[in-house]
Image (cartoon, rainbow, N blue to C red):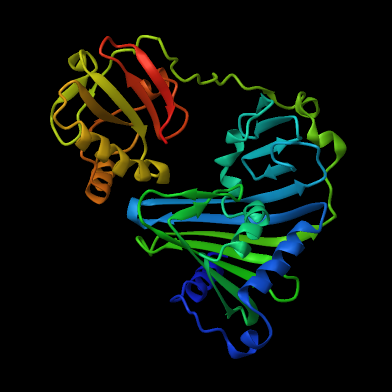
Amino acid sequence: MRTLLFTILLTSLTVFNNKLSSQTKEYMTANEILKTLSAKLNSPSNISYDYYRSINYFSENYHNETSGTTYLDFISNDSILRFKYQLENDQSKMIYNGAESFYLNKKEKTIKITNKPKLSDFSSLSFFVNSIITLKNALPEIIGDKEITKALSDTIISDKNYFLVTLLVKNKSLNGLGTFTPVTLKRNFIYKIIIDKDTYLPMQVIQTNNVEPKDYVLTSFANFKLDNNKPSDNSWYYSSYANEFNPSTEKVVNLIKTNSIAPDWKLPLFATSGTLSLKELKGKVILLEFWIKNCSYCIAAVPKLNSITKKFDTNKDFEIVAVNANDTKKDISNFYVKNKPSFKSVSDKGKLTTEYGISGFPTVVLIDKKGKVIYSGTFD
């Protein structure tokens, strides 16, 4: 399996080629192929398939693999996602039935339920990275966007000929739910969509970028079933799993509230042998930025924070301190060398992050001169 994927990757990660093969060019354009693909993904009332996803960020020393099965049901009155899903692998099963979502931990035999989830609860799900949902929702915009460069060619995998549509997207990237997110750093994202010529269904999506060309995300799909293979009606309900799974005892993380007094801390100061504490900074307005290395939004936040640091360079009553949640000294050092933050950073091992109720990155907490929290939330 890994040998095959490696062969596929070498085949598809070729230099961007604007010349279409003469046979394909004669009959079709990239947009026409994408329109056919879009129609194919929008025609069934439900889709099931096997998936494999490999994230390889060599520049960040990060690798992760996920595989499993996906079932998507588009007959739903839900106003948030407009579809229901069941996502499953050996370790877990995730279900959203249009009203509630729940997570089954197969190893621990626990179940965690979220009533009336928000859109933000779904946007970071790894199952949706460059997925069928991504393509289904994004293709209409991609087709109509003239600033997205599109090229059509052929590629051969295991002696079979496929369409290869290559997209060049400038300064924005696709999130899992199929909307584009602007990126602060100038960066072009390249998406290669490999499409079966017989079924017009996607076989793979490969994402790279022009800044770190060796970094890539590979998502592959297999064993499609359209309008078929429905799970049982009972499988959608929390109560159906109550006998086998116990309620999770995991505590709900609540972000530190405004008008509360920020808890004190004392942590190792990066690149020095010293420490830094909140008590030492009393009398200043402090912006704490909680971050981790494998986070594109954290990377995008660096230029903004550097700009703020420069703007208030002469103001001794203001300071930015980045709080790394759990990375090693080496990883933090690599991040600083590559992204060049101009502000201080302290190393946390999860205690402060938990105490402040941080559940996503980057998150910022603004503390006034008296130690009171005046803002906590995302950094836009």
Residue 102 falls left or right of residue 5: right
Residue displayed at 70% across by 76% down: 197
Residue displayed at 30% across by 25% down: 287
Residue 95 falls left or right of residue 227: left
Does residue 203 sit above or below 179 in this rendering?
A: below
Residue displayed at 51% across by 56% down: 54
Does residue 291 sit above or below 8 in this rendering?
A: above
Residue 80: where, in percent of width, then height?
Answer: 69, 36
Residue displayed at 54% across by 18% down: 251
Residue 206: where, in percent of width, then height?
Answer: 52, 63
Instruction: State whether residue 325 appears in this view.
Output: no
Farthest bottom residue in view: 22
- Image quadrant of residue 131? bottom right
Q: Quadrant of the C terminus?
A: top left
Residue 96: where, in percent of width, then height?
Answer: 72, 36
- Image quadrant of residue 20? bottom right
Residue 310: where, in percent of width, then height?
Answer: 20, 37
- Image quadrant of residue 244? top right
Residue 121 falls left or right of residue 290: right
Return the residue nearer the eye: 148 or 336: 148
Return the residue nearer the eye: 167 or 49: 167
Instruction: State whether residue 231 appears in this view.
Output: yes
Q: Quadrant of the N terminus?
A: bottom right
Does residue 101 sit above or below 317 in this rendering?
A: below
Does residue 203 sit above or below 132 in this rendering?
A: below
